[in-house]
Amino acid sequence: EYNLTAQRSTKEFIKGIKTETYGYNGDYLGPVIRVKKGETVSIKLKNLLGETTTVHWHGLELPGDMDGGPHNGIQPNETWNPQFTINQSAATLWFHPHPIHKTGAQVYKGLAGLIYIEDEVSQKLNLPKDYGQNDFPLILQDRRFTKDGRMPYDLGMMDVMHGFQGDTVLINGAVNPFLEVPQGKVRFRILNGSNARIYNLHLTKTSEFWQIASDGGFLEAPVRLNQVDLGPAERAEIIVDFSNFKTGEVIQLQDRDENLMKFIVKDKSTKNVTIPKSITSIPKIEPSSAKTTRKFVFQGMGHMVNINGKQMDPRRIDEELKINTTEIWEISNASTGMMGGGMAHPFHAHGVQFQILERNGKEPPKNERGWKDTILVQPGETVKAIATFKYKGIFMYHCHILEHEDSGMMGQFQVK
Ligand code: C2O
Ligand code: CU
Ligand code: CU
């Protein structure tokens, strides 16, 4: 049983200046909700915002009426109490509001939190898993502050086109963030919680880390990388080995050549973790088991962004599916050149986890061979993904650039 209160607050991002924010149970962002596979969860969300909100469980596989999409509006001073059973593997998911046309504004002001699912695999593995010691969440968000410390969500033409981009990156709600890390292996559960920014993450002083999980859970084996791209709403769990650094040494997390965060190496870690050769096995969904292939074309720009030529209409169901069937979804980004701005669009669907079959006809990179609920699709690219739809109800699919979603780059599918 969890209690969340969506509330208005203020936070001192900049010393001595109070900035108006929204938060779940606090001044900005929200708690980590920890659940176990098999557990039945009841969450009470109280809305003290003075405006309609919803709370959506991004990445959870669950019935449509518990999903927290635009249909599940919570009026001011009301409480919503969804209940559902966790029926998927260990993963780092998140939750955020989803009211129609206002998702961007409410997330921007601070409404977002994490969900950790644990299962036998995550509990048995000798991975870093001590919260706040060698297992840290990193929620990346970009914001724009005025001189007097306000964080207004006023959209200019460029913000409508490209999504709202800030000049100040907050990590876990902190400006100029730093983190003391043990001299050993450390796990970071990274969420791109930005409205629109795409990060290209890497570290200074060490060119390698291991990605162990993508959006929907562990990869079959750790993937050695020297950089990782994260589109809005995507997650990556990585392990960084700090054991060869001296106490006091500073390693920077960077996006391209911008410093985002300092890691300051402390004492030797008391935990002895090794990076496993293999983590789990992911049952492959066979393309031959798919009954249908559906096409989704992301196109247009600014207020005209759309999917398959249509903009979101809450009274219209765009796609009808049968429960317990497997489908291939082919997502193309037609926004190339002058007529579409040449932008990447992060595709996301509710209530389901996909496996990527192909990117432009080729096998996806190793770190995308696990479960995915958000897929960054580059201009001109076509991605084929497969999923089995196990829950009934009405769900959304949309671009996770929140300004595109709010402009109507969203549709509804119903599973019957
Ligand atoms: Cu992360 Cu429709 O949402
Ligand atoms: Cu979602
Ligand atoms: Cu988009």
Image (tube, grey):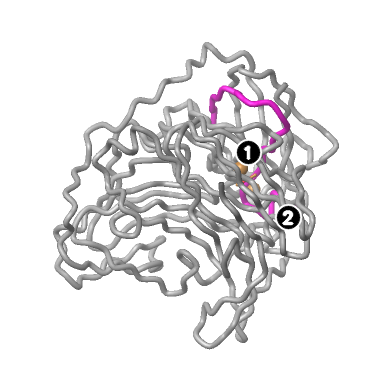
What residue is at 64 percent from the left and 16 percent from the top?
292
Queried whether the magenta region covers residue 80, the answer comes back as no
Q: Secondary structure at mark 1?
A: strand
| Residue on which the image places disc 1 | 83
Q: Quadrant of residue 348?
A: top right
Q: Left or right: 104 with respect to 366?
A: right
Q: Residue furthest right?
A: 315
Q: Which residues are magenta?
A: 383-406
**Image location of residue 20, percent across then percent down:** 64, 75
**Image location of residue 387, percent across then percent down:** 55, 25
Q: Relative to 284, does residue 75 appear above or below in the rendering?
A: below
Q: Earlier in the sequence, mark 1 or mark 2?
A: 2
Q: Nearer the viewer, residue 124 or 274?
A: 124
| Residue on which the image places disc 2 | 53
Give the quadrant of the C terminus: top right
Q: Relative to 378, does residue 384 appear above or below in the rendering?
A: above
